[in-house]
Amino acid sequence: MELRAYIVRRLLLLIPVLFGVTLFIFGLTMLFSPIERASLYVRSPRQMANIPEIIETYGLDRPFYVQYGTWINQVFHGNLGWSTVAHMPVLDAIWAFLPATLELAIFCTPIIILAGIFLGTQAAAHKDKPIDHVSRVAAIAGWSLPTFWLGLVLLMVFYGAFNGLLPPDRLGHQMSIVVNSGDFVRYTHINTLDAILNLNGPVLVDALRHLILPVATLSIVSVAFIMRLTRSSMLESLGKGYILTARAKGLAERVVVNKHARRNALIPVITVSGYVFAGLANGVVITETIFTFKGVGWWEAQAALRLDIASILGFALFNAGLFVLINLIVDILYTRVDPRVRLGGVMQ
Amino acid sequence: MTDLRFMVRQLVRNPLSLAGIILIFIFAVIAIFAPLIAPTPAGHGDPYMIPRDGFSATPALPSQQHLFGTTEGQYDIFYGVVWGTRSAFRVGLVVIGVVVVIGIVLGSIAGYFGGVIDEVIMRITDIFLAFPALILAMALVTVMQPSLTSVMIALIVVSWPSYARLIRGDILQVREEDYIEASRGLGASNARVIIRHALPNAIYPTLIMASLDIGAVVLSAAALSFLGLGAPEGYADWGQLTAFARNWIVGPSSDPLRYWFAVAIPGLFILFFVLGWNLLGDAFRDILDPRLARR
Amino acid sequence: MKDLIRIRDVSVRFYTYEGVVHAIDDLDLDIRQGETLGIVGETGSGKTMTALAILRLVPYPGKIESGSIVFVDKGLDKEIELLKLSEERMRSIRGNKISMVFQEPGAALNPVYTIGDQISEVYLLHQRQELAQRARERVNSLLANGRNGWAATVKRPFWRWQRRLYSKIAQESNSIEPRLLGRLPLFRRLLRRLSDEAMLLTVDMLKDVEIPDPARVAAHYPHELSGGMKQRAVIAMALACSPELLIADEPTTSLDVTIQAQMLELFRRIKVDKGASVLFVTHNLGVASEVCDRVAVMYAGRLCEVAPVEELFLNPLHPYTKALLDAVPMPGKELLTIPGALADALNPPPGCRFHPRCPSAKPVCQQERAILKEVSKDHMVACYLY
């Protein structure tokens, strides 16, 4: 099947899924009373004060499908409701909190991928030797760690015991002032990037200092996962016939492992990277809460606590859409990497 | 079944899986004998609510009276972690038990009958799987009013799709095997073929995933409780106990690690419980995958 | 005929969890220059292990315990003790002087690389200097051409740089500058001519093994080829550097009968055209009779009989050989089998391994194994009957 046809087919299949997703979210909202649902439709606090009018305008006491229509309509117009936690429309809130989470993601992703794959390859290549056993136990332990507990312990040690060496929040007090002053241009709202673009060293250092613990907390679980997967995938790959052929050709062991075995072993790892992203999305909620790192995860946790329905649902919707997109990208990537999936047909 | 005996022998021989089994066993003992280990004070009421010794906000250090100290609000930590073991087992086993059953039923139907039924069930799982688990669970718990029961329901809703998919995949593989054709040729009904022939062979990867997931479920439940979306305040739940420690990670500047016990102890219980199940699940995986088992 | 490989007293043992398995027991065998020697036997007879032992590719938990395997290098006119070579020198022999073809071509090829890539890999590994020479000559002719467009003017310094690099590689395969550059992303392109030259040789080789439209096939992935084509590609890979010995482990077993016939024809041609020796491992007597000059029969890790092919089929001496030949099904003939079961690998019978199933067994057969003796011209047997 041609690649383009494959992509088109997948995109078409996406539509019923997205439809189902919106239906599901909306179904959840129907479990709330009309008054609570009102926050889904407003854009400002003034509007919130006038609830009966809102119920009237949006027909919040009319049948299900009518309401669904109204809601979907306004979602397409960009109105996801009003966030009581953030005091701004939900869409704006997502926009406002996203850079912090992106910053975490930018630092976590390469660490997870590189460390996980490297450690996994080493463990597989030196199977049953000490490094394999140690890394295996470390991986299982890392995987069993409650993220929130790890974050607390790290804070306790590095912030408490070491007297504020690696603090929570995104920036220290002084640097926050610098960043919000007029001299500092906010290009992306990602502190490290902005610091580089503004050629401001102290801000960069401070931002990095605040990033170390959250990034470590977030990465550990995913690194353990990728490492285990890479190891078992590599072991399977190393047991295949083409490895014997490669050795019979006279290739050095290092080339056999890195060139022949690993490329095949990475295929399932790529397939799984969608799940890794999901794991990050989950971990972000807890990590940002513990370190008071004000990104979308922190906002979501606050919203859940304070029953800010519009925020919760709006974010769930956003997340679902993103997730579906990422899975599509991963699928396409998969066809690029594995030639067997890409093209079909046998030559004679 | 010599298969089973072989499996058990392998499990016991591997030091890591043995460690896992021992850990789970220890926790099981704690859970069963909870009333003996940490007796509920007379006239207390619901044993799952931790007894309080006063209302002071500052955690008290471990002492004769309170072996592991108390949390903010003077809840006895020792009592909490012991009875929390029961909560953990309850959450883990109930959620996974229900999820496996749902997964088997829906997955078998989808895998065996194929066609439209399969497509529909798969699209439904797609919808659920479109959400990162914790986020969806959070949304569901908010809808249902936070409590441990709603956490369990939320986790069931979030977890079943993966199992349905897994079992469906296995049934699809197994469906093409000759012995299925053979039993159909002999006139066996569809249900019989599924239950007696297809399932037993498809069940092993599910076993692996289930034992690994018990740990993951307990972790998620603890995370939700920690965020305040799970067990109510004062309930004997490990995540809930850790939440109390949030404000006390740093003590006075002269003794910053003063309240370490409030943070460390509930967390360690979670860690070792999950570790036990993970070790077991990992060992299952190594044993049931014949290619990896051969040295 | 002179010897190419001399195997003496080689034993291969597997240290498994259940016990020690004697895969090969004190084997003595010669492979002569230019001959196709077949090794015939059932599963577990040790024939594949013999092939792997020559290349020192015996997998864990197996070990080559004792003995010597001498390789007579025609090109260098030296005798090399293979079992004592360093791993690095052994690697320079694998795929180069001695190469191997495996049973399942589908499994032998890496699914994520093209056929052309996998075959070129052999050239790039073992014939780097020759490739560099050719590349240098090509760049030389480009420079000498004296074209004067602005494109040529821009490229000229790069051509000169390439010429220098290729000269360095031609002199010293592992020289530093090209090796470093080869690792850097952009500068790698300078060495691209090496792979281009390798690909030219690859396409030639594919043509040699009678693959139609070789340039197109080289650009394809293994899963896009049929079984016969894959096996030809694998053979091309093994023959790339004109080895002195080609080891083929059941190369036709997984193919259709019609393709099998073509494959055997190919092997016959290889013997004639390339002058290489072939070690042909198979369990199929018919196939052995078609291709081989001499045939060796193995049972339970030991050599039973070795003879020129016609002599073996007309005049089999060892009871096992006779039983094998009798067991070949023929229309009109009663179907004969060899009574008893294969020797247990963990607890083999004492003395001669075949004696429990042998119709002519004598008391001495239970106690000590017979030594290989030459009974008639070039016809050796290990049996107390002679």
Image: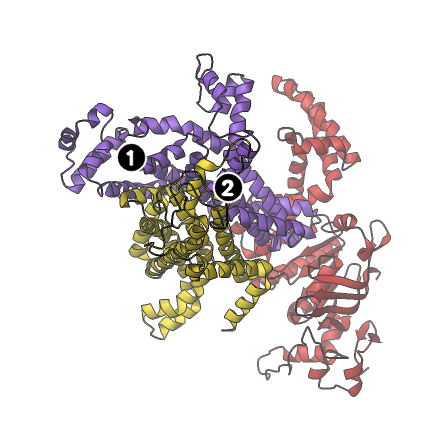
Chain colours: A purple, B yellow, C red
Tell whether B188 sits left or right of B177: left
Tell whether A194 sits left or right of C42: left
The three-letter code of the residue at mark 1 reads Asp
Mark yes or no: residue C250 visible: yes
Residue A331 position, x and y percent, is 44, 43
Chain under numbered label 2: A
Q: Which mark is residue B107?
A: none
Residue B28 position, x and y percent, is 46, 60
Same chain for the residues under marks 2 and 1 in the image: yes
Residue B266 position, x and y percent, is 47, 47
Tell whether A153 sits left or right of C46: left
The three-letter code of the residue at mark 2 reads Leu
Instruction: Say which residue appears at 72% left-offset and 38% top-offset.
Output: C131
Q: Secondary structure at mark 2?
A: helix
Instruction: Say which residue appears at 49% left-offset and 56% top-offset.
Output: B277
Q: Which residue is mark 2?
A: A150
Tell whether C39 sits left or right of C259: right
Q: Quadrant of residue C269?
A: bottom right
Quadrant (top left/top right/bottom left/bottom right) for the N terminus of chain A? top left
Closer to the chain start, of discs 2 and 1, is 2
Looking at the image, residue A100 lies above or below residue B229: above
Chain under numbered label 1: A
Residue A131 position, x and y percent, is 65, 49
Q: Residue furthest top?
A: A183
Q: Quadrant of residue C253?
A: bottom right
Judging depth in this view, the residue of B199 and A294 nearest the camera is A294
Q: Which mark is residue A308?
A: 1
**Mark 1 neighbour class, 10 Å CA radius: few under 14, some 14 to 19, many 20 or more:** many
| 3D distance between C-alphas at marks 2 and 1 | 28 Å
Q: Secondary structure at mark 1?
A: loop
Mark yes or no: residue A343 visible: no
Judging depth in this view, the residue of C226 and B263 nearest the camera is B263
